[in-house]
Image (cartoon, rainbow, N blue to C red):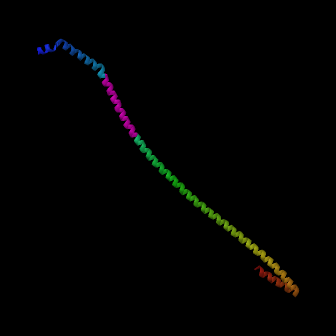
Amino acid sequence: MDELIKTFHIDWKLLIAQIVNFGIVLLVLHRFAIKPLSKTMDRRTAEIAKSLEDAKKIEENLAKIEAEKAAKMLVAKKEAQEIIEQARQQGEVQGSQLIVEAKNEVQTVIAAAKEQIAGEKSKMLKEIKTEVADLVTLATEKILAKVGRPEIDEKIVETALKEIKK
């Protein structure tokens, strides 16, 4: 071993001093560089893990919100369909009511027109009977004036008038 030390020119005192220096440098590096870096890296790792966890939670919440939104949209669509259906049914009901009311009004107008026509017809018949009675009376007077007797004439006129009025 002596030969080895002499061949490589190794000084054991220098070697021990270098080992001590290396230990001190290692201790200083560990104390002031590696330990703070390790703490910073651990803290960053924890922050990143927390951020990832938060991102997962946000993603889950977003998925829940999307599902709720879709459900609410379905409910809103169903409600809109129901409202449209109710409006359509109400429109049909109102339409049928308007048709019934219009038919009733037409029936009322027709009935009033028939009554008016019937009244005018009876009025015209009365007028015609009166005119015919007057004409018959006039014709009978002219005929009887040529034939002769006033008592018989009056009876004939009264009988003719009674028959006409029937």
Q: Is residue 62 above or below residue 114?
A: above
Q: Nearer the viewer, residue 138 or 19?
A: 19
Q: Main secondary structure of the magenta part?
A: helix
Q: Quadrant of residue 166?
A: bottom right
Q: Residue at x 28, y 19 (%)?
A: 29
Q: Is residue 54 magenta?
A: yes
Tell me: 77 left or right of 95: left
Q: In this figure, what is the number of numbered marks? A: 0
Q: Residue at x 63, y 62 (%)?
A: 102
Tell me: 43 left or right of 70: left
Q: Quadrant of residue 7?
A: top left
Tell me: 44 left or right of 20: right
Q: Is residue 90 magenta?
A: no
Q: Which percent across, then down, holds residue 23? A: 23, 17
Q: Which percent across, then down, holds residue 55? A: 38, 36
Q: Is residue 30 above or below residue 14?
A: below
Q: Which percent across, then down, holds residue 5? A: 14, 14
Q: Which percent across, then down, holds residue 74? A: 45, 49
Q: Residue at x 49, y 52 (%)?
A: 81
Tell me: 90 left or right of 136: left
Q: Quadrant of residue 49?
A: top left
Q: Nearer the viewer, residue 124 or 28?
A: 28
Q: Quadrant of the N terminus?
A: top left
Given the current orientation, which residue lies at the most extreme front position? 7
Residue numbers of the magenta segment: 36-61
Q: Residue at x 35, y 32 (%)?
A: 50
